[in-house]
Image (spheres, grey):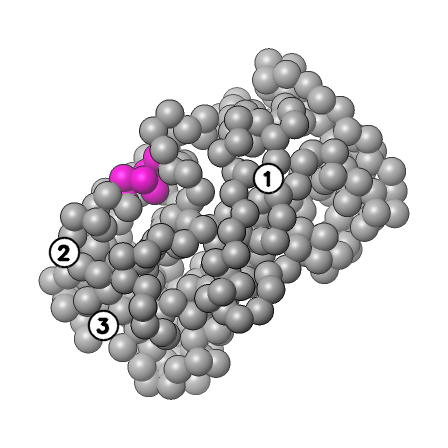
Amino acid sequence: MIIVTGASGQLGGLVAEELLERAPASELVFVTRHPDALDHLAERGATVRRGDFDEPEALAEAFAGGERMLLISTLSIGRRAAQHRAAIEAAAAAGVQHVVYTSFPKPLAGHPVGAIATEHGETEEILHASGLDWTILRNATFAELQIPPGALAVAGGKLYTNAGTGRLASVSRRDSARAAAAVLTSDGHAGRTYDITGPEAVSQTELADLLSEVSGRAVKLVRVGDRTLTWGLTRAGAPKPVARSIVAFGKAVREGYYDVVDPALATLTGTAPRSLRDVLIAHRGDLLGAV
């Protein structure tokens, strides 16, 4: 059986859909803190179980019978490594043989975004030492995350950035889900780390051009420094922690942490990934929503 954690989340829900196209529903177990949200999957014959990484004593039961498990990283920044350790230990106790983990590009010590990245590196180390078979999926930044700031840029006609000439590779959530489902339902992936990316890395100049093209409204690129961007964001009402995170992300782009493009996704799924342009076109209404 295949276990999927975080199955009621955005990525988890897409993985569930992909798996139901590839495997019998009777062989799928979807674990979530909110089982009622997955009644539609239970109605299709899958098993839905409650599981909470903050309640590790009950996780082994939630993972019982599983052979392969997709461990989708949680959103609890600062606590994720401990949560993931609890899940990995529970998986081992439940007899799971192979854990597939959704990680992050270049999760290195000293990363500008701090624990957002480094906790993924810690989890990878925990998996390496677990004695289980493992596969790491280092998902690029989700292309859909460009929509909210893109909408603001379209509304104001300006894209403010501290990313310099750095380039950002992204990937659609659906493509990430397809890659995860492919790994979970095929062999030969134990001990492998895959960078799951779209087909290209985009500069901020190219992003401004894409926003202009897709929205039909001119978007001018405005380059600023870290301090200026922090000041501008807080002046616009962003809480200081949010402003610091946005600035840190731009710094990481500037320093090349997200400039990773790899053909692994196409190799795993047999089809080319969608480009950022494709995703922006699909969300054109959202880009224009703030106008």
Name the secondary structure under disc 3: loop
Say if mark 3 contacts mark 2, CB within 8 Å: no
Classify 10 Å Cα crowding around label 1: few (below 14), some (14-19), many (20 and above).
Answer: many
Quarter of the image for the N terminus: give it.
bottom left
Examine the rendered structure and indicate whether residue 134 appears above or below residue 118: below
Q: Label 2 belongs to which residue?
A: 131
- In space, the residues marked 1 and 3 are separated at their CA atoms by 35 Å
Relative to 125, 274 lies left or right: right
Residue at point 38%, 38% (across, down): 107
Quarter of the image for the C terminus: give it.
top right
Frontmost of labels 1 and 3 is: 1
Q: Label 1 belongs to which residue?
A: 168
Residue at point 27%, 57% (across, down): 191
Residue type at the position of mark 1: Leu
Residue type at the position of mark 3: Glu
Whichever of callouts 3 and 2 sits on the residue coming sooner in the sequence is 3
On the image, the x and y values in percent for residue 287 come to: 75, 48
Name the secondary structure under disc 2: loop
- In space, the residues marked 3 and 2 are separated at their CA atoms by 14 Å
Main secondary structure of the magenta stretch: helix
Residue type at the position of mark 2: Gly
Q: Is residue 120 magenta?
A: yes
Q: Quadrant of residue 152?
A: top right
Say if mark 2 contacts mark 1, CB within 8 Å: no
On the image, the x and y values in percent for residue 129 come to: 16, 48
Whichever of callouts 1 and 3 sits on the residue coming sooner in the sequence is 3
Magenta-highlighted residues: 118-123
Q: Label 3 belongs to which residue?
A: 67
Which of 191/226 is in front?
191
- In space, the residues marked 2 and 1 are separated at their CA atoms by 34 Å
Whichever of callouts 2 and 1 sits on the residue coming sooner in the sequence is 2
